[in-house]
Image (cartoon, coloured by chain):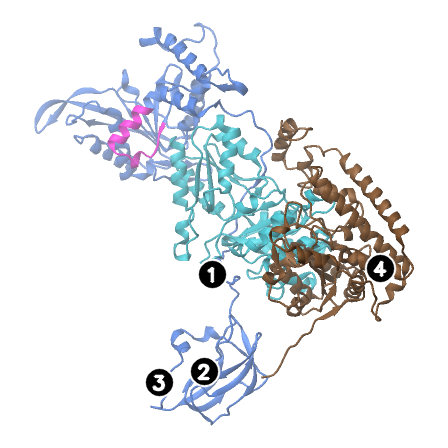
Chain colours: A blue, B cyan, C brown
Amino acid sequence: MTTFKLPDLGEGLPEAEIVAWHVAEGDRVNTDDLLVSVETAKAVVEVPSPYTGIIARLHAKAGDVVETGAPLVDFDEDSGGESAGAKPAQEESRPAAGDEETQPRSDAGTVVGNVMSGDDVLQETAIAGGGRRRGRGRVKAAPAVRAEAKRQGIDLAEVTPSGKNGQVTQADLEQFQQQSQQRARPAARPKAPKQAAAPGQSEPLRGPRRAMAQSMTRSRDEVALCTLFDDADIHEWVNKRDFTPRILRSVVAGCAAEPALNGFYDAENVSRQLESRVDIAMAVDTGEGLIVPVIRGVEQRSLDDIRTAVAEMKEATLNRTVAPQDMVNYTITVSNFGMLAGRYATPLMVPPTVAIVGTGKLQHDVVAVMGGIEVHRRIPLSLSFDHRCVTGGEAARFLAAMIEDLEKPQ
Amino acid sequence: MADVSLIDALTMAMAWELEHDPRVIVLGEDVGVNGGVFRATAGLQKRFGAERVQDTPLAEGMIAGVSIGMAAQGMRPVAEIQFMGFIYPTVDQMISHAGRMRNRTRGRLHCPMVLRAPYGGGIHAPEHHSESTEAFFAHMPGIRVVIPSSPARAYGLLLAAIRNPDPVVFLEPKRIYRLNKQSVEDNGKELPLDVCYTLREGSDVTLVTWGAMTYETLKAADQLAKSGISCEVIDLASISPIDYETILESVEKTGRLVIIHEAARTAGVGAEIAAIVAEKGMYDLRGPIRRVTGYDVVMPLFRREMDYMPSVAKITDTIRESLND
Amino acid sequence: METIADFEIQYSQFLDPEGKASPDIPELARNTDELVNMYRHMTETRVFDTKAVNLQRTGKLGTYASCLGHEATHVGLAAAMHEDDVLAPSYREYGAMFYRGVRMSEVLLYWGGDERGSDFQGPKNDFPFCVPIATQTLHAAGAAMAFQLRGESRCAVSVNGDGGTSEGAFYEAMNIAGARKLPVVFIVVNNKWAISVPIELQTASKTLAQKAVAAGIPGIQVDGNDVIAVRHWVERALARGRKGDGATLIEAVTYRLSDHTTADDASRYRKKEEVEAARKLEPLIRMRKYLTSLGLWDDEKEKQLLEQSAEKVDQAVQQYLNTPKAPVESMFDYMYAELPEFLEEQREHAMHYGSDGEGHG
């Protein structure tokens, strides 16, 4: 037995009304004989028989409203009859036509295509307009002047503008360059950090020193500090002077081995957020105090690439052109405190970061090699971590991975 | 307050105005019993009757023309064109009459009408159903062009468009008609019509976009935030007139501008924004203005439509380029 | 085969070219004051038209579209309208516009390049001049829709030419007017020429009135040189509209005796003989003969009317010529209900460079 279901006679019509049957139960019909007249929302339509056979059952009577896809007629088909194998294409093209076909179609809300639908609630704060507060922004300069300043490594903010509406002009740039060359000449030799006040007089802390006071106080108050010490033997190094780039790469190796040290700790919510990016802050001592530029995405950089980034950072530090946004939002810190003296330290990280690596003064050490004694260069390493959210084991694995990476020839 | 989709918000706004202003008439093809092909007018005819929510004959130029006639004689028609691809027969009426009526009669007659149309790609529609040609109308003096990008703005801006005494072409980003929901209070409160909406404040780069592209742009901004890049995202909302002050103010802060639109690049609205920022914000720029737009080709049929449009990757790459300047 | 639809188009003329009235001349012809009034308007319009062409020819007016020969159609349709009906003209219906209270000086201002010409001090709700052909038919339909929705007993009247009947907007307007039974009258002034294209090349339709058939509204052809016929049938059509019976199309057959505009030279594309033949049918001759035959008119009255008309036109011309240019910023001040912020700068720029003299300095 085969059941013929009411097809969709228009475009998305949900139902049709039976106007008149042209056959009765028990009748023999041939394919394309007139079966039933139905009225849809659009028209009265004559529906022919899709099969040859005997009408076994009519599922509705004249005047009934039948939903699209609901059973209409049961046929006892002729076996081997001439049209018995000729099933309507519609049935074939809808192999999945099941019970759900009898459900009213849900509204697609469109006449073409498919409009994506979602219940996600949009959270936004839209600020209408922007007020009219222009004229108090950053430095104004023509793009050509900016390009020139960038080439020369000049921070436009330090240049006194003489142009219209406070613009820095090409002439301002040239004048600044001349002045800074004059300033630079006597200062060519290394100098002691400048004294801002006479000895014996109280001096309020300013700038980087003040920031240091605040962040280190916070660190002392919040962090459960623990430091591991060890040394990395760099005897095999091909490029003996590749110090900073290799340190940075080894930090990446440490992070790869133990992600727990690369991220943030939120004490208030007792939660941590580990990062896949490795954005390393490099603490650098300058006359004005400590500044901490960030090299971003170190995990994605080749050693060459790291070298370039370090060189650029050094230049920017020297020229004081490190922008404020280039000194925030880092995931881990490196402090090369041992330029002058000091092998080990207990460096303090700035919350919410959880780790800081200190590198001490390079020194030739006597080491045992294959039962003998050799003299190798070694880097003293001090790894401080916040024991509130980092375990000693994690820190040790991190440090071990660093050392392994540092001891590679290149 | 209910969480509603963008299209629900449009229906709410039309219902509010039909309820509160007897001059308001909704008309268009299939807007009555069928509630519009996207259901923007669903239930309105049942509630307000077949006179105030009218199914019209199938002639877009006529829909615009009779709306102008009605508007000039004191009504507030809100006409629907089914798709942007069918809006072109209205161009003669809109440019020759709607945008000129007030001026050419020295204010004796004017055209407070709204011409609504869904626009943009991304719904797998057939040919002629996916265009973004807002620039045509933005080029016509005397006509406002408004594009909402969230349920709240759909509600507030459509109310403002209907109440505005000038003709408004109100283009609806159909790809995000039902994409998400937002809490919108049905209180009849309109939003200002000729300002930008700053969706996210940031310091490194200004992103200006509108319509469905706000979706990709916000995603791009979210991604970049993880790398420490801070994007200011501005929804233009009013395509004509443009609130240049907000854009210029933002560029003054960030020094960088990336414009994202779905429409083809050449002579697109992005070109106008870039020109104005070059004219008035040049000294704040730290690098070239960049655009991420549809290509200057016929909108492909839907198997390739997403390749035509700006994607999150295209946007983030362009922003990174901009930051390297 | 059977005929399932059929149509016929009636033609109506009450005054023949010799000014003889047909026996079925309607009631309105009994109102002799009105007859004289209409003739007065037709003559004033003719005098104005002649003067306007001369002003253009002497560099005091821009391009001007003459209405020579159309006076009966224009005055007749306006005389049929109520004051609160709305007219949507094309651009040469001066006879209708003057009848409805538009000032001659306003028409001169419009063709003299000043938007204030469309700020009619008379019929406040009438649509302005409409140059894009037949687009105004939709405005009339829209106005009729507004009247219908508000339950007002008002009608809209649109006027377009024979060329305009080829435009989609014309069909679209008739179609919705038919479908919605809108109180609107579409008047087609068949003056035989659309610039250089004759009606035979415009359409294969025997009449333009039959274009109403497809929209399901009545269409009738009248002699557009017969002011009584025009007025009568427009009155009937307006009464139908006011009763809620819907729209009507009236084809008024006349002839464009002038060039298309003062920038056009019709001798390039039509024969002198055709124009001369049409001139014998023009509307003022027959009306003057008819009034004379009724004892309402004579040479003295004609002379007086021409003098009065010339004086009236001269006053309008003086008023036009003495109207200073609108301030340069006025081009901004009517674009939007409120000037958008970005336009303020352009407005100031225009004011800075704006000249009060002629041309660019």
Q: Is residue C125 left or right of residue A48?
A: right
Mark 3 neighbour density, 10 Å: few (under 14) some (14–19) many (20 or more): few
Give the magenta-colored segment's residue range.
A294-312
The amino acid beneath tag 2 is Phe
Q: Secondary structure at mark 3?
A: loop
Mark 4 neighbour density, 10 Å: few (under 14) some (14–19) many (20 or more): some
Query: Is the C terminus of chain A in the top left, top right, bottom left or bottom right quadrant?
Result: top left
Labels 1 and 2: the sequence-earlier one: 2
Which residue matches tag 4? C289
Q: Secondary structure at mark 1?
A: loop
Q: For residue B304, say whether it is visible.
A: yes
* Magenta stretch: includes residue A331: no
Which residue matches tag 3? A85
Q: For residue B11, say whether it is visible.
A: no
Question: Is C114 situated above or below A7?
Answer: above
The amino acid beneath tag 1 is Gly
Tell me the residue at 32%/22% (across/down): A314
Mark 2 neighbour density, 10 Å: few (under 14) some (14–19) many (20 or more): many
Query: Residue A376: image x %, image y %?
Result: 15, 23
Quarter of the figure with residue C231: bottom right
Which residue matches tag 2? A4
Mark 2 chain: A
The amino acid beneath tag 4 is Lys
Labels 3 and 1: the sequence-earlier one: 3
- What numbered label is drawn on residue C340? none
